[in-house]
Image: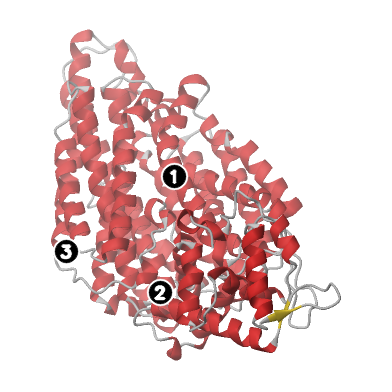
């Protein structure tokens, strides 16, 4: 996790910035090579994000090869549970001991898990190795986003965070397609092997170029709370996935898992009440809004990943399409989810009203589940695409907005943990959705296959269990019975969606009780990683404020920014002159010819600004030295910074900076750095020239 205050002390890009006495600051990554480590971080994020979706289209083939249809859901669930539990630990360990070494460790663990998954010989091994992958995946996501704060100044951070969010959106589309391509043209094992070259490149680049000085924080890690919440989730997921399939619901094993889960839950509550830094602070549940959002998030994760896991089985087995085509068939759902997720976040950001979106989203999700339950082996491609689209539109309407709602409902001190909590419940819901859907599907399929095959003469050595172990054997059965078996598969899968409808209805009813509050401007900047991803990336409250303010600042027209703060400071200066004063204030001195050479501002504009600040006695230079502020110039620059700080403070809404010293200090640091430009040569792709605000020059 980044420290935005300390990060803002470094130069943009993490480069060296002169200290108060002119001495150089800490060495870092300069603009010229900034894209190299950022690219490596994006590759690492790609690995973790891709593994959330790429496996889905390969699952039917994996079952055909390894058997164990009743445990299919655990291939997905094991990764999610391990990743969710490990995420806060990785973040805090990185804060305490340095992020680089733990980021490298997470890549190594992830790659080790990938290799083991690729060589797995049975379903039990694959599930265990997927958990190893998940442990590394949690670190990849949280640490890659944290390292961005170590490399990039607050003013530019929003641009890069948007890239990381886009990775989630892209992988949600590419995952099913790539999974299908590998299965069709290579082997399902390449779903895991593909991680190796990408991960090795990321590992080598990070080792070679990431030398920035990192901020260390003191933490008390809630190890016991983390272990307990993971154990509770595991017990309950095991109970729902094994009940009715491996063991009867009334068996001592299932009852024992339920009782153990409840005992561990009580222990978790007791531990969290006394933990110094609890993994899930219980005080959050005193907020009615947070409690409602937690339940709704759980249901959204439940429905989304339950569908993503079992729709490929429907397409490949029932509709008899290839794995690649099954990924293409699912595109309407993923595209619908992306469009409404991003769109709803943008609309809320501009209007300030959000209550309608979770209500509409859960309602459309209910309709989508009902439509999915109507599919059968005779459904047309157009019908399936329409149903998938409706379901995706519903999920997207509610996904992004839930994060905004929960951020808006808590105090500043709980902003970070509340954001992580909302995505935590969505991730846990996804684990439950996959396991519950899997149980319903497996038990229903076994019953229907037994009914269909009762009294039917079967080939020698053939048993009904062979169909669930390898669906490809259906083609070996008599033609008259094949249609009934495909119908049994179709009905078993679509019945899952029908049973999910009441759960979605509960979410719809709960969303009606959400109360709309005035939206704080700082939390209306959508973060795609929170929208699409499932990992609860834990950031501190300062991190959340810094991220949102940075995103908002990157959208501002730079010319209008300096025009506004000049007017607010009560100065009769051209915007370019105010910009020049702030460069000198932040960097100590500037060389106008150097600024012109770097094409930050046109030379004619710089010349005019230099004449004005020198003519008014705000800056001077002697003996060919760089341009420096005079005493009146320093006073004018301080007024400009104060005006910028006041603008930022207004964005905090009811979070009074006077109540929080760290928040006040953050505003002071950001006010200066968000107005400054790099001292080193900027990458023209990274930085928009400040004079291009709304297409006009200063």
In the depicted structure, whether residue 340 falls above or below residue 520: above
Q: CA distance from mark 3 to mark 1?
A: 28 Å
Mark positioned earlier in the residue sequence (1 or 2): 1
Q: Is any atom of residue 239 visible in this view?
A: no
Instruction: Give whichever of 336, 66 is nearer the camera.
Output: 336
Q: Can you identify the residue that label 3 sits on?
A: 510
List x then y, in percent, for residue 5: 58, 76
- Please, which residue is most extreme toward the right here? 623
**Figure quadrant of residue 294:** bottom left
Q: Position of residue 84 (x, y in %)?
A: 45, 58
The Cα atoms of the two marked residues, 3 and 2, are separated by: 22 Å
> Disc 1 versus disc 2: distance between alpha carbons?
26 Å
The crowding category of the residue bearing disc 3, from other C-alpha atoms within 10 Å (few below 14, some 14 to 19, many at least 20), is some
Does label 3 or label 1 sit earlier along the sequence? Answer: 1
Q: Is residue 407 left or right of residue 201?
A: left
Local secondary structure at mark 3: helix
Dot 2 crowding, Cα within 10 Å, few <14, some 14–19, many 20+: many
In the picture of the structure, the residue carrying the numbered disc 2 is 415
């Amino acid at each position: 996790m980044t420290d935005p205050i300390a990060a803002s002390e470094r130069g943009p890009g993490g480069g060296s910035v002169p200290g108060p006495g002119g001495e150089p600051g800490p060495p870092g990554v300069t603009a010229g090579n900034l894209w190299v480590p950022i690219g490596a971080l994006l590759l690492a994020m790609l690995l973790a994000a891709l593994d959330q979706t790429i496996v889905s289209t390969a699952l039917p083939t994996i079952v055909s090869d390894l058997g164990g249809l009743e445990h299919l859901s655990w291939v997905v669930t094991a990764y999610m549970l391990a990743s969710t539990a490990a995420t806060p630990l990785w973040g805090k360990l990185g804060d305490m001991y340095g992020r680089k070494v733990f980021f490298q460790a997470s890549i190594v663990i992830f790659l080790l898990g990938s290799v083991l998954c690729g060589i797995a010989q049975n379903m039990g091994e694959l599930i265990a190795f997927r958990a190893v992958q998940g442990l590394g995946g949690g670190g990849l996501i949280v640490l890659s986003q944290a390292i961005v704060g170590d490399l990039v100044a607050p003013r530019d951070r929003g641009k890069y965070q948007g890239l990381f969010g886009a990775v989630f959106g892209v992988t949600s589309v590419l995952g099913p397609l790539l999974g299908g391509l590998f299965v069709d043209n290579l082997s399902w094992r390449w779903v895991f092997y593909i991680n190796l070259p990408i991960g090795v490149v990321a590992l080598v680049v990070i080792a070679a170029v990431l030398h920035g000085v990192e901020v260390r924080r003191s933490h008390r890690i809630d190890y016991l709370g983390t272990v307990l919440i993971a154990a509770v989730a595991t017990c309950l997921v095991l109970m729902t996935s094994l009940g009715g399939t491996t063991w009867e619901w009334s068996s001592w094993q299932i009852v024992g898992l339920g009782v153990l889960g409840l005992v561990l839950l009580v222990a978790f509550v007791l531990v969290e009440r006394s933990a110094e830094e609890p993994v899930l602070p219980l005080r959050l549940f005193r907020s009615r809004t947070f409690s409602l959002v937690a339940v709704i998030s759980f249901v959204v994760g439940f429905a989304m990943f339950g569908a993503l896991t079992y729709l490929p089985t429907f397409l490949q087995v029932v509709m008899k399409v290839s794995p690649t085509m099954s990924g293409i068939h699912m595109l309407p759902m993923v595209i619908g989810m992306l469009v409404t997720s991003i769109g709803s976040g943008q609309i809320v950001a501009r209007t300030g009203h959000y209550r309608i979106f979770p209500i509409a989203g859960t309602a459309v999700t209910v309709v989508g589940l009902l439509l999915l339950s109507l599919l059968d082996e005779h459904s047309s491609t157009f019908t399936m695409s329409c149903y998938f689209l409706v379901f995706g539109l519903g999920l997207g309407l509610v996904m992004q907005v839930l994060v905004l709602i929960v951020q808006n409902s808590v105090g500043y001190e709980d902003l970070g943990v509340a954001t992580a909590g909302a995505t935590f419940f969505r991730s846990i819901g996804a684990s439950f959705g996959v396991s519950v859907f899997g149980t319903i599907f497996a038990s229903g399929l076994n019953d229907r296959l037994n009914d269909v095959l009762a009294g039917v003469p079967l080939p020698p050595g053939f048993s009904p269990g062979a169909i669930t172990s390898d669906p490809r054997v259906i083609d070996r059965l008599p033609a008259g019975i094949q249609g009934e078996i495909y119908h049994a598969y179709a009905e078993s899968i679509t019945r899952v969606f029908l049973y999910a409808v009441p759960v979605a209805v509960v979410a719809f009813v709960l969303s009606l009780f959400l109360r709309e509050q005035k939206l704080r401007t700082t939390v209306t900047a959508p973060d795609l990683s929170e929208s699409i991803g499932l990992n609860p990336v834990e950031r501190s409250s300062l991190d959340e404020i810094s991220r949102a303010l940075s995103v908002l600042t990157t959208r501002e027209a730079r010319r209008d920014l300096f025009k506004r703060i000049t007017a607010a400071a009560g100065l009769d200066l051209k915007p370019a002159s105010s910009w020049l004063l702030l460069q000198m204030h932040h960097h100590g001195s500037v060389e106008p010819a150097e600024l012109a050479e770097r094409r930050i501002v046109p030379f004619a504009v710089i010349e005019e600004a230099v004449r004005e600040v020198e003519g008014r006695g705000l800056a001077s230079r002697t003996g060919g030295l760089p341009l420096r502020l005079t005493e009146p110039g320093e006073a004018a620059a301080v007024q400009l910074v104060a005006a910028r700080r006041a603008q930022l403070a207004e964005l905090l809404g009811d979070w009074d900076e006077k109540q929080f010293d760290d928040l006040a200090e953050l505003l002071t640091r950001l006010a200066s750095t968000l107005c400054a430009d790099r001292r080193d040569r900027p990458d023209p792709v990274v930085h928009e020239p400040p004079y291009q605000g709304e297409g006009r020059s200063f």
